[in-house]
Amino acid sequence: MARVRHKRKPVAEMNVVPYIDVMLVLLVIFMVTAPMLNQGVKVDLPKVSSEALPQDNNVQILTISIKADKTYYWNLGSEVDTDKQMDKAMTLPEMTDAVTKIIAAGRDQGKQTQVFIRGDKAVDYGAVMGAMGGLQKAGVGNVGLITEAP
């Protein structure tokens, strides 16, 4: 009896099993290495002495001071004299309202307002960010942070 040989047709399908294996290996590698990545870099910030900013007659300087107990004070002028500061302690909403009025009065006089924040080193980061958010609501675009010279 003669054997009938059937000619095999070429398979037109692509075998994806090896690709799936490679993808699973890559997935496992990423799952193992992802928790090991650092989310930030620990740095010691330098203490830098710098020159004073030049004075401009069309600019009024507003300084917001934040104490460790999260009370806010403001001082209008280029010099901050904490001994002679007559401002009362304010909450964040009160400070935002006061800054809005100060900026509006400065605009009426044709002056721009530069705002600086003096935060106690023991104050919460959230209190400083709250002040910055309040200043943004009051219409302040740029805020400077004041530090001590070394």
Image: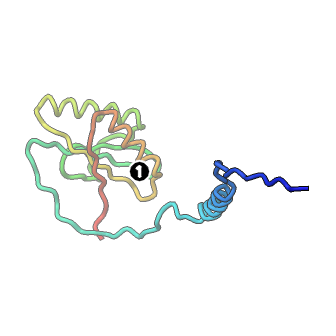
Between 3 and 68, which is closer to the camera in this rendering? 3
Q: Is residue 12 left or right of residue 58?
A: right
Q: Is residue 74 left or right of residue 29?
A: left
Residue at left offset 55%, top offset 64%: 37
Residue 18 location, quadrant: bottom right
Q: Is residue 133 left or right of residue 80?
A: right
The answer to whether 98 is drawn above or below residue 40 in the figure is above
SS under mark 1: loop
Residue 117 percent across, percent down from the top left? 32, 49
Residue 96 percent across, percent down from the top left? 35, 34
Between 114 and 79, which is closer to the camera in this rendering? 114
Q: Quadrant of the N terminus?
A: bottom right
Between 50 and 61, which is closer to the camera in this rendering? 50
Residue under numbered circle 1: 67
Residue 124 percent across, percent down from the top left? 47, 52
Q: Residues within 10 Å of mark 1 (few under 14, many from 20)?
A: some
The residue at the far front in this view is 1
Residue at left offset 34%, top offset 48%: 65
The residue at the far left in this view is 57
Residue at left offset 19%, top offset 30%: 105
Residue 149 percent across, percent down from the top left? 28, 67
Between 39 and 58, which is closer to the camera in this rendering? 39
Residue at left offset 83%, top offset 53%: 4
Marks counted in the figure total 1
Q: Quadrant of the C terminus?
A: bottom left
The answer to whether 84 is drawn above or below residue 46 in the figure is above
- Which colouring convention does the figure follow? rainbow
Residue 30 location, quadrant: bottom right
Q: Amino acid at mark 1?
A: Lys
